[in-house]
Amino acid sequence: QVQLVESGGGLVQPGGSLRLSCAASSRIYSIGAMGWYRQAPGKQRELVAVTSIGGSASYADSVKGRFTISRDNAKNTVYLQMNSLRPEDTAVYYCKAVPTIRPDLSYWGQGTQITVSS
């Protein structure tokens, strides 16, 4: 089992910035890939950004150049720095972690609301 605790959501004006954090813990698994997904009302959950344990990263086209994913492997924590936020970024953001030896498993955080509005 893997437990994920997210923090950093909230209300921000368009053009503003927020930083999300997600700390993973497990007695059984080492943590491999970690990522952020989001789900807006009435829409499917979509990938925002993912990072491997080596630090390589991939982004959705809609956030490239605005969002940066990073991780601290010693703390099993992944971050999402979000700049130049837009109203269309409004969604519930979820952290996801995949164990290194069980890539068939996925563990999700509880979700944190991001609202971009003036």
Image: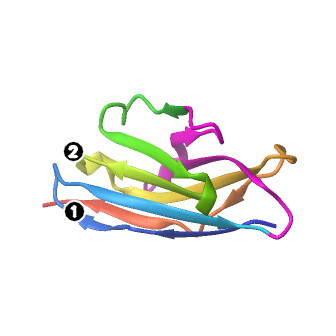
Q: Which residue is painted at 77% across and 68% down in the image?
A: 26
Image vertical order of residue 13 relative to residue 101, above or below: below
Could one spot residue 76 in this view of the protein? no
Q: Which residue is painted at 24% across and 48% down in the image?
A: 85
Residue 16: percent from the left, percent from the top?
A: 18, 54
Contact between labelled residues 2 and 1, with CB atoms less than 8 Å apart:
no
Label 1: which residue? 12
Q: Secondary structure at mark 2?
A: loop
Amino acid type, residue under disc 1 in the picture: Val
Q: Which residue is painted at 36% across and 42% down in the image?
A: 67
Could you say which is closer to the camera, residue 34 or residue 44?
A: 34
Magenta stretch?
27-56
Q: Secondary structure at mark 1?
A: strand
In this view, which residue lies farthest toward the left? 118
- 94 sits left or right of 3 in the view: left
The quadrant of the picture occupied by the C terminus is: bottom left
Residue 56: percent from the left, percent from the top?
A: 56, 32
Q: Quadrant of residue 76?
A: bottom right
Indicate which disc residue 113 carries: none
In this view, which residue lies farthest toward the top? 61
Image vertical order of residue 103 relative to residue 3, above or below: above
User: Badge 2: how crowded within 10 Å, few (<14), some, or many (20+)?
Assistant: some
Indicate which disc residue 84 carries: 2
Q: Is residue 31 magenta?
A: yes
Could one spot residue 96 in this view of the protein? yes
Image vertical order of residue 61 relative to residue 55, above or below: above
- 90 sits left or right of 49 in the view: left
